[in-house]
Image (cartoon, coloured by chain):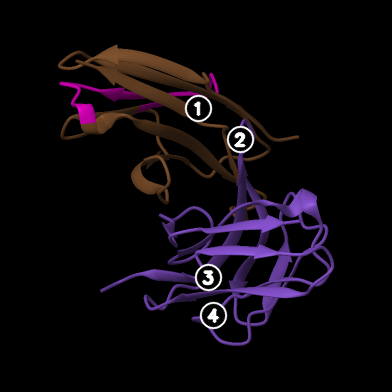
Chain colours: A purple, B brown
Amino acid sequence: EAQVTQNPRYLITVTGKKLTVTCSQNMNHEYMSWYRQDPGLGLRQIYYSMNVEVTDKGDVPEGYKVSRKEKRNFPLILESPSPNQTSLYFCASSPSGGATEAFFGQGTRLTVV
Amino acid sequence: GQNIDQPTEMTATEGAIVQINCTYQTSGFNGLFWYQQHAGEAPTFLSYNVLDGLEEKGRFSSFLSRSKGYSYLLLKELQMKDSASYLCAVPYSSASKIIFGSGTRLSIRP
């Protein structure tokens, strides 16, 4: 089954404790992206990757890191999480570039206390 | 800069028709997407318009006017399961980035 898989689905952590949210897709898509979704603000793009080893900042990259060492995986790293990073996070993949249909993971609800 | 506007909330009656509007301002144009998002779930693709006009797909249709920076999503024969948020999204920066509207929460009443 074609899918984007994120883990974990739910995470509660403390300020400053490094964490990684994993994202994997099995559709051989070139483009992958991370978003955060906050009430009233909609989906905001954090980072994106056009292909392996090619990543760039979206609209809200501060406090986040990503890597794309393999085509299927695109982890999101929070080196020192803060409470303002409490949010619902989605990973998405598209066949090629942002102008193709996006397939979203199930979401990760992160709480930083 | 980039900007997308859509109404925050709408209410409609089961069996009726509803139109959800979206206006956008972007540098360059690479098409416009509509996604549906049920509460607590991931967004799912509904439509993609790159040329002016209306595209119909079952009960859902999407319209685009590039000269006006305007799109709408038309939902016919509304069903209770259509209660969801509808997100308008536009790729920009040579389609490398994507901006989403804040979404329109549609409630269907019996």
The residue at the point 44 percent across, 56 percent down is A102
For numbered disc 1, what is the local secondary structure? loop
Identify which amino acid the numbered label 2 is placed on. Answer: Pro
Identify which amino acid the numbered label 1 is placed on. Answer: Arg
Identify which amino acid the numbered label 4 is placed on. Answer: Asn
For numbered disc 3, what is the local secondary structure? loop
**Which of the chains bears the disc numbered 1?**
B
The residue at the point 52 percent across, 21 percent down is B8
Residue A56 visible here: yes
Residue annotated with mark 1: B66
Residue stretch in magenta: B63-80
Q: Judge left or right: residue B58 versus residue A100.
A: left
Residue annotated with mark 4: A73
**Which of the chains bears the disc numbered 3?**
A
Q: From mark 2 to mark 1, how far is it between C-alphas?
A: 29 Å
Question: In the figure, A51 relative to A87: above or below?
Answer: below
Residue annotated with mark 2: A39
Circle 3 residues within 10 Å: few <14, some 14–19, many ≥20: some
Q: Residue A82's x, y, as percent? A: 82, 57
Q: Earlier in the sequence, mark 2 or mark 3?
A: 3
Q: Residue B35's x, y, as percent? A: 40, 41
Residue annotated with mark 3: A8
